Image (cartoon, helix red, strand yellow):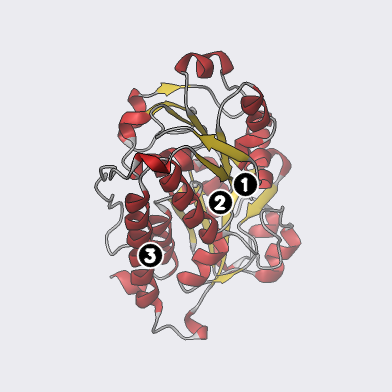
Amino acid sequence: MQMKHIAIIALLVMMAVVISGCSGTVTPTPTPTPVPASQYPMTVYDYYNETATIASEPQRIVSLSAANTETLFALGLSSKIVGIDDNSDYPAETKDVVHLGGFATLNYEKIVSLNPDLIVVQDIVGGKTAPRLREMGFQVIEVKNTNMTMVRKNIELLGKVTNTVQNATTLIADMDRKIAGVSAKMAGLNESQKPTVLLLTGFVASKSQIYPYGNGTYGDELLTLTGGKNAASDVIMYAVISNEAIVKADPDYIVIPVDGKMCTESDYNYFKNGSAPWMKDLKAVKNGKVVRVDGTLFLRAGPRLPDAGLALARAIHPELFQ
C-alpha cells in the first residue's frame, strides 16, 4: 500500500490519463506526412523551457509516460517507438515494444542500449529523470498536461519535432469535434439539471486520503463540459480534499475512475458502500450514485480525453443516453 501511496503522490503532485457518440472509438492510425528535410536541425523548447536540438527526423523514440505513448502512436509513429515505460499499455501494439521499467525503476542501461534520438518525458516521471537523461547526452522533451490546452500544445509540439505536423492538426481537430459533440448534447441543460460531482483521481485507503480533480485541471474542465458542477472546486489542482469538505459539498454523484492503481475496484466498493461512517449520509451514497468509470481514460491526458468526457457524460447524465 505504501508503494501505491508513493505512486499517487508522484502522479498527483507532479502532474498536476471529448468525445464521440460511441464509446471506445479509436481513430485509425495515420501515416506520417513527409515534409522538407530542411526543417532539421531544429531546436525546440519544452514546457520547462529546456531546449532539445533535433538533428534530423527522429527514427528511434523512447516514451516515458502512457499519455505520451498514446499520443505518439496516434501521430502514426508506431514503427519509430523503440522503448516505453511499463505503464504504457495502449494501444495493443505497445506489448511488442521494449519496456523500460516504471517511474521509479527505469532501466537506464536499457535506454542507452536502444540508442534513442528522442526521449519524451512527462512531468510525473521527469523529476531527476529528465536532467539525468540530458546529462547522458540524449535529446529530451518534457511535457506537462494539467489541462486540455496543454494537451493540445503537447500534441502540436510532438507533431513538429517528429515531422507529423499534419497528423497532429488532424488529431486535434478530431478531438475538438468530439468535444463539440458532447457540448451539443449538454446544451439544453439548465442549472438545476447540472449535478454536483466529486470526480476522483486517486485514493490512498491506508491514509484515507482522497484526491479529486480540483480547480485548474482537465478533470474540472471535463465536468464543466459534461454538465456537472465540481464538488472540489475549492481544491487547487490535485490536493487532498478533507472529509468535511466532501460532507459540506454533499455531491449528487461520486465518480471513481478505476485503473487498478490510482483507484482500485476495492476503492470503488469502499465509496459505493459508504464504508466510512462519515459517508453514510452523502446523497451520492444514499441514492446509489457512486459510479465506476474506466480510469485509464481519465489518468492519461492525451488523445483519449474525448472518450473520458463521454464516459463522464454518460455517468452523470444517463437520461441523455437512453
Amino acid type, callout 2: Asn
Rendered location of residue 13, percent (x, y): 69, 46
Q: For this view, does 72 lie left or right of residue 250?
A: left
Q: Inspect the image, locate mark 3, and give the three-letter code of the amino acid beneath it.
A: Asp
Residue to which mark 2 is pinned:
145
On screen, residue 3 above or below 30: above
Q: Of callouts 1 and 2, which one flags the residue occurring earlier in the amino acid sequence?
A: 1
Residue 113, position as x, y percentages in the image: 48, 13
The reply to whether discs 1 and 2 touch (Cβ–Cβ < 8 Å) is yes
Q: Disc 3 on helix, strand or loop?
A: helix
Quadrant of the image occupied by residue 308: bottom left
Q: Position of residue 3 (x, y in %)?
A: 65, 29
- SS category of the residue bearing label 2: loop
Count neighbours of disc 3 (C-alpha within 10 A) and say few if under 14, some if 14 to 19, many if 20 or more: some
Tell me which numbered mark, 3 or 2, is placed earlier along the sequence: 2
Residue in view at x 64 percent, y 69 percent: 250
In the image, residue 60 above or below residue 273: above
Does residue 256 show up?
yes
Name the residue: 56% across, 58% down.
Answer: 147
Mark 2, other Cα within 10 Å: few <14 / some 14–19 / many ≥20: many
In the picture, the disc for residue 15 is 1
On the image, numbered disc 3 is attached to which residue? 176
Disc 1 is placed on an element classified as: loop
